[in-house]
Image (cartoon, rainbow, N blue to C red):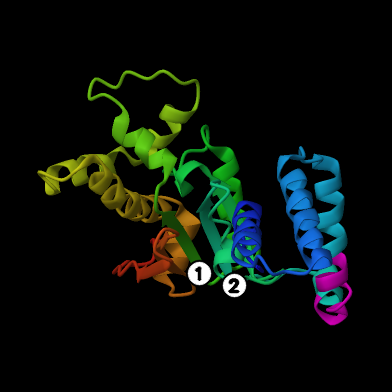
Amino acid sequence: MAGQSYEEAIAELNKLLSEKADLGGVAAAKIKQLTAELSAAGSKPINSDERIRTGFTQFKKEKFEKNPDLFGKLAEAQSPKFLVFACSDSRVCPSHVLNFQPGEAFVVRNIASMIPPYDQTKYSGTGAAIEYAVVHLKVENIMVIGHSCCGGIKGLMSIPDDGTTSSEFIESWVQICNPAKSKVKADTKGQSFSELCTNCEKEAVNVSLGNLLTYPFVRDAVAKKTLALKGAHYDFVNGSFDLWDLDLKISPLPL
């Protein structure tokens, strides 16, 4: 029953009881006990503190203590090859999806994995992360990952044409990728709203890649060919991952 939900496990056990009328009394009683325990476990509220402690204990036992050389090196410094922008959606953690190990990727997560244009007065958190990764960590790749069923993109596509908003932060943020929305609506006539959102999930990645080039230190590194920009889209419904390069012909900025 590995990998099953408790509902599936209960259903399977009940089926076994109904099909195997000749089960011995002890075996049948044991199955009924397991069914009751599974039902109780499914209805029991989660203790958040205990979940955190248990998670760390498992990490320490299975990862930290089994990889002393790796964590010893990480205690001295980090040297990631990737700066990854990913969505905050709980279903798309890049470390799990791409099996990144500690120290491999410098990760920034936000709504819809968007990157705003260079602006020293706004979005300074994003700018600081990019600057630190490119200038100080000297990452070799920046990858922006969009994903299926993205609520941020759905929100962007749902904003009325007159720009009316109803949230304090969300709609202002996702409109960073208004150019993606406009392009998708212009290029894909007759598609369903769901199809438009899927196309926009990918086009928004390209808008963010373009916005990266408004950061002088990013543009300079790309021009010197010490930094590559990559777009990606993770479809967790079908279990697929698309990856593409941003092919640019950029000259170094004049000094």
> Which disc, if any, is residue 81?
2
> Which amino acid type is shown beneath numbered disc 2?
Lys
The quarter of the displayed image where residue 252 is located = bottom left
Q: Where is residue 152 in the image (x, y as percent from the top left)?
A: 42, 39
Q: Position of residue 158 (x, y in %)?
A: 31, 30
Q: Please, what secondary structure does the residue beneath circle 2 have?
A: loop
Question: Would residue 22 appear left or right of 195 to someone viewing this image?
Answer: right
Question: Magenta region's main secondary structure?
Answer: helix
Residue drawn at 84 percent across, 65 percent down: 26
Quarter of the picture containing the N terminus is bottom right
| Count of all numbered marks drawn on residues in the image | 2
Is residue 22 at least partly visible in the picture? yes
| Up/down of 207 relative to 3, above or below | above
Quarter of the picture containing the C terminus is bottom left
Closer to the camera in the image, 16 or 102 = 16
Give the farthest residue toward the front: 22
Give the farthest residue toward the bottom: 69
Question: Would residue 205 appear left or right of 65 to someone viewing this image?
Answer: left
Q: Where is residue 220 in the image (x, y as percent from the top left)?
A: 45, 63
Q: Please, what secondary structure does the residue beneath circle 1 have?
A: strand
Q: Name the residue under label 1.
A: 141
| Up/down of 44 relative to 168, above or below | below
Residue contact between numbered discs 1 and 2, judged by CB atoms under 8 Å: yes
Closer to the camera in the image, 126 or 55 = 55
Closer to the camera in the image, 99 or 73 = 99
> Which amino acid type is shown beneath numbered disc 1?
Asn
Residue drawn at 77 percent across, 40 percent down: 44
Residue drawn at 54 percent across, 60 percent down: 84
What's the magenta region?
60-70
Closer to the camera in the image, 29 or 201 = 29
